Every structure is written in structure tokens, then in C-alpha cells.
Amino acid sequence: MAYLRLQLLKVMQTYGNPNLTYPWWVGNSVVTSKSSRFIGSHVGHTGLIAFNAGAITLFELARFDPSLPMGHQGLIFLPHLASIGIGFDEAGVWTGVGVAFIGVFHLICSMVYAGAALLHSLVFSEDTQNSSGLFADDRPEHRQAARYKLEWENPDNQTFILGHHLLFFGVANIWFVEWARVHGIYDPSIEAVRQVAYNLDLTQIWNHQFDFLGISSLEDVMGGHAFLAFFQIGGGAFHIATKQIGEYTEFKGSNVLSAEAILSWSLAGIGWMAIIAAFWCATNTTVYPEAWYGETLQLKFGISPYWIDTVSITDGPSAAFGHTNRAWLTNVHYYLGFFFIQGHLWHAIRALGFDFKRVVGAVRNLDNASIKLQD
């Protein structure tokens, strides 16, 4: 119990008060030292994402008007499916064939994820370290879950879990590369779906790190994904097979590695990807074809950057709002990414041990000093 309390204090930055209580909706504190509950929250989140993808896909399909350009109808999921070659009939025309299956499949997956989340939240042990199987069976094979226990100050444990995440990401990249090679994806230059082989040219891949906004070759796009798959799987294998090398110092995360620190890194990653996606979506018509997303955008500056349409939308469901799919997707990605980055900074500073109550105290001291000067 003392260990759990120490972890709670360290992870959630309670600033020395061990008697804090939290409401049910403060998820971080609820799952801090309960690894099985932590996993349940992740699986539940995945279920919500899957449900959203399935439900909105079916909603967009139901309101899609084939007589109007897809890019002018305020859609998000249908353009993505069309970009990867889903929804085309045998003549190569996008009709939405097969899209309903994609939506229903995601809804079914969301129910499976929800069931797993409920098991981890209500049935399984709160801590995977104490896991003994669904039916309290103590056989060794039922205790393998203990290897995935989240031990924040154990670098060997953290690198082991990180390695598995990297493997999954690598496999996902391979799946996408093989999908493009075997099934094919939409090529706006020929306005049709074609099979795309990856171009694993390391020089080209390196050069595109600096001019990725202007990529005009689907082969180069797939080559980048193939390289990333190799890199991630190699990194995953390395992290799974190796352990902490040398002394565990502050430079390597000692006294910093915590749930809040990991949350901050996750927010930084997703925030940075969202901002990159916004700039890419605004102008690139190879990965974001005009046929599905609408015309390219113009960058403007006010209080912050924003993008506006270069055409007037007077038809379709988006006429009332006057924006293309591209405008919606770009601006939403940018601002979500911006706030994710702010969340990263907040949680990273807290993980380093900074007490934000000091800011409040400093402001109060300034006010007091000002009053004394006036007196």
C-alpha cells in the first residue's frame, strides 16, 4: 500500500497531500497504479474510436449525393476510403460499393473492444501483476500478463512494452504497403485506382524529409511507409530483446519516468502528427486528391494560422457553411494538434516536478507588493 501511495503521489503530482480524493471522471488518477484498469481504459478508448469510424462512415454514406463533387459535401471518412481505393465499382467509378461493410465491421470491432474494456475494468484483477486468469487459474501460462505490468520506475519493463507497440506500428505499415501493392490505391494523375509498388530509395526518402509537402509520387509515399515499417520493427525487436544498459541515471529517465511523462510524450507525438497532416492536407493533391477533398487551400494569418478555401461552395450539404472537405480536415487537425502540444508542455513540466501552485503564489506576491507600494 505504501508503494502504491508513493506512485500515486509521484505520478499525479499531488504536491505532498496524500489524502486527495478524485471523482470518477479523473481517469489518470483512477488507473495510476492499476495496470489492468489502465489497459481497460486504452481498449475502451480504441472502442470509441472504432465506433465513431463505423457510425460516421454509415452516416456519410447515407447522405452522400453522387450528383455533387465529394469534396464539396463536408465529408471526412468517405474521402479517406476513396483515397485508398475502397468504394469503386468494376468500371472504376466511385459508387460506395463495399463501404457499408467497412462501417459495420468497425461497429462490430467497437463492441469487441468494449467487451474487453469491461473485462479489464470489472472482472480481471486491478493489477496485471496479480493476474491469474479469468477463472482464478494459477497456471503459469495464465500469468503471462504480469510481464506487461506498468512499472514506471523500471526501465526494463518500459522498454519491453515500448517494443511491442513499435512492432504493432510496423505491422500496420506493412499492411498498408501491401494493400497498395496488391489491391491498389487511387492515383489522381490518372483518376483511377492502380497498384503501387514501393520505391525503397533511401536517398529519396531522406530528401523527402525536407520537401514532403510537395511529394507527387505514390511510389515514394509507399517507399516511406516501407522504410518506416522496417525501422519500427527493428526498433521493436531491439527494445524487447534488450534491457537497461549501465546505470539508470536521470539522463535516462530516473525520477522522471512516470505515467504523466508518458502522457506528455504521447500528446507531443499526436500533436506534431496532426500539425504536419494539416500542412500536408492543405496543399498536397497526391495524397489528398482534389476529387475527394476539394480544391487546395490558402494559408492566412490572424491571431494564429488558418486556411481558407480558394473556391466558393454553393452546392451540396456544405453550402450553408461554405467549406470543402479539405478546409474542415486541415483546420480541425491544426487546432487539435496545437492544443495537444499545449497539453504536452503542461504534463511534461508537471512530470519534471514543477509545482504550478508556485505561479499562483508568485502572482499573489506581486499583488501584495503592488498594494504595499500604493500605501
Image: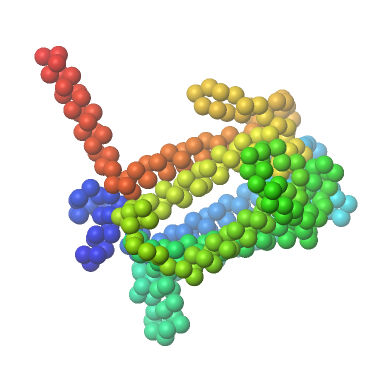
* Residue 109 visible in the snapshot: no
Which is more toward the observer, 238 or 117? 238
- What residue is rendered at 76% in x and 45% in y? 217
Q: Position of residue 254 (x, y in %)?
A: 33, 57
Which is more toward the observer, 28 or 345? 345
Q: Quadrant of the N terminus?
A: bottom left
* Residue 153 visible in the snapshot: yes
Q: Position of residue 226 (x, y in %)?
A: 68, 57
| Residue 374, quarter of the rendered image | top left
- What residue is rendered at 34% in x and 61% in y? 248
Q: Quadrant of the C terminus?
A: top left
Residue 16 position (above or below residue 71): below
- What residue is rendered at 62% in x and 27% in y? 299
Q: Residue furthest top?
A: 374
Q: Residue furthest front?
A: 246
Q: Residue furthest right?
A: 91
What is the image's colouring? Answer: rainbow
Q: Residue furthest bottom?
A: 139
Residue 265 position (above or below residue 334): below
- What residue is rendered at 77% in x and 58% in y? 181
Residue 157 position (above or below residue 278): below
Which is more toward the observer, 102 or 365? 365
Count all numbered tags in the image, as a single digit: 0
| Residue 123, quarter of the rendered image | bottom left
Q: Position of residue 215 (x, y in %)?
A: 71, 41
Q: Position of residue 229 (x, y in %)?
A: 63, 59
Apparent side of residue 261 relative to residue 77 in the rendered image (left or right): left
Apparent side of residue 254 relative to residue 297 in the rendered image (left or right): left
